[in-house]
Amino acid sequence: FNKVIEKLKVNAGSAIMIGDWPERDVIGAKQIGMKTVFAKYGDVFNTNESGADYEINCIQEILNIIKSENNL
């Protein structure tokens, strides 16, 4: 996560990680301060609690999250 943030030249607090594996995607991103989105549509582990800031059932839902995060 740090490498990607560095390459994009953004701070972690302004980036969003979207993933479907809480232990790998959500925890790592949250540890460096990224917002996290759990993609329930890709979950093969029947996760009950993702720990993510947001959960989505469809990738199109990310648009509302981005708007919300940017106060639009």
Image (cartoon, helix red, strand yellow):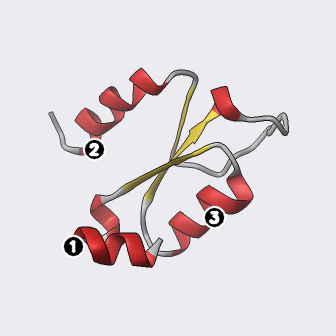
Residue at the disc numbered 3: 27
Residue 66's spot in the image, x, y percent?
29, 38
User: Alpha carbon of mark 3 to alpha carbon of mark 2: how far?
Assistant: 20 Å
The residue under the point 58% across, 49% down is: 52
Q: Are marks 2 and 1 in contact (CB under 8 Å)?
A: no
Task: In this rendered view, identify the residue nearer to me: 66 or 4.
Answer: 4
Instruction: Please state if 71 lies on the left or on the right of 57 as rendered.
Output: left
- Amino acid type, callout 1: Lys
The mark found on residue 47 in the picture is none
Mark 2 or 1, nearer chain start: 1
The residue under the point 67% across, 32% down is: 42
Q: In this picture, is 46 found above or below 57? A: below
Q: Are marks 3 and 2 in contact (CB under 8 Å)?
A: no
Q: In this picture, is 13 found above or below 31? A: above
Residue at the disc numbered 1: 9
Q: Total number of numbered labels?
A: 3
Residue 28, quarter of picture: bottom right
Q: Residues within 10 Å of mark 2 (few under 14, many from 20)?
A: few
- Amino acid type, callout 3: Ile
- Amino acid type, callout 2: Glu
Camera-near label (3 vs 1) is 1
Q: Secondary structure at mark 1?
A: loop
Q: Secondary structure at mark 2?
A: helix
Mark 3 or 2, nearer chain start: 3
Q: Specify the quadrant that holds the C terminus.
A: top left
Q: Residue furthest front?
A: 7
User: Alpha carbon of mark 3 to alpha carbon of mark 1: how far?
Assistant: 21 Å
Residue at the disc numbered 2: 69
Q: Secondary structure at mark 3?
A: helix
Camera-near label (2 vs 1) is 1
